[in-house]
Image: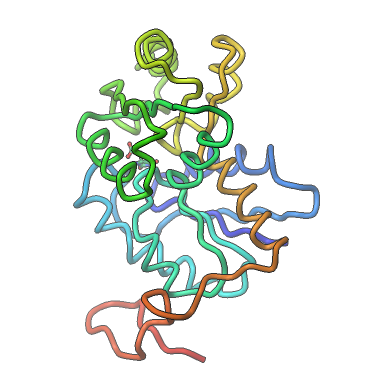
Amino acid sequence: MRIRLINPNTTETMTETIADAARLVAAPTTRIEASTSKSGAASIEGHYDEAMSIIGLIEAIRDDPDADAYVIACFGDPGLLAAREFTAAPVLGIAEAAMHAASFVATGFSVVTTLERTRIIAEHLVRNYGMTQHCRRVRAVDIPVLALEDPSSMARARILAECEAAIAEDSSGAIVLGCAGMADLTRYIQDRLQIPVIDGVAAAVKFAEALVGLGLKTSKRGDLAFPLPKVYRGLTADYAPE
Ligand SMILES: O=C(O)C[C@H]1NC(=O)NC1=O
């Protein structure tokens, strides 16, 4: 099978980190093809950035209509329901996937994300995904997303310390990494803290494989039916069904 992995921000190097994490767990028969949004912000750190990322996300799906599944590799899961309208293939958001995976291996988990403002957005996701009884706390290390790629930011050490605090203070049995850019930290943290650490990129890839293996596609009844055919002025992501 073939999964289209979409980084909705415009940072190619982060797409490479994400794709490496996906390929590490993908089945031998799964091909991971990664794309970086052609429009929007270099990092997504708020509602506005998420909104600005959705056209690029939809265009990435439009440009690869025959993937068996799609993964939105941004912890805000931007445009998840719009993407599920746009295609019949399964679409996974890394936040939703990570939270469900964590709920299968622990009775409570903590999320460690980047900025305070995205911490609040992650709390909205916890509620929207029905995870309030599983998520003990959402934490932020207060570093910008792109600092994850800067060794001088000490991001790795600060994230590890926040995970240690989560274990000591939150009664959590698992940690969810709250940013696609943290996808390369899973082993580093898990080996040091001896606790399940879930990166949403890896979780989403495996859930995509499972859904495709079950022959499940996105429902086209109700609110996830294909969009009504119309022209969208000024945009390139017109929806014109075959
Ligand atoms: O919301 C965040 O902090 C993380 C989110 N932003 C981004 O550009 N990729 C992400 O996964």
Q: Position of residue 192 (x, y in %)?
A: 57, 9
Q: Is residue 57 left or right of residue 189?
A: left
Q: Position of residue 62 (x, y in %)?
A: 48, 74
| Along the line of sight, the residue nearer the viewer: 69 or 166 | 166
Q: Is residue 73 left or right of residue 23?
A: left
Residue visible at 62% across and 74% down in the picture: 66
Residue visible at 34% across and 55% down in the picture: 78
Q: Position of residue 133 (x, y in %)?
A: 37, 35
The image shows residue 211, relative to residue 26, as above or below, that is below
Quadrant the N terminus occupies: bottom right
Describe the colour scheme in one phrase: rainbow
Q: Tell me where residue 171 sits by quadrant.
A: top left
Residue visible at 54% across and 11% down in the picture: 193
Residue visible at 52% across and 91% down in the picture: 242
The image shows residue 150, relative to residue 192, as above or below, that is below
The image shows residue 233, relative to residue 197, as above or below, that is below
| Along the line of sight, the residue nearer the viewer: 97 or 49 | 97
How many numbered callouts?
0
Q: Outermost residue toward the right?
A: 28
Picture quadrant of ligand 1: top left
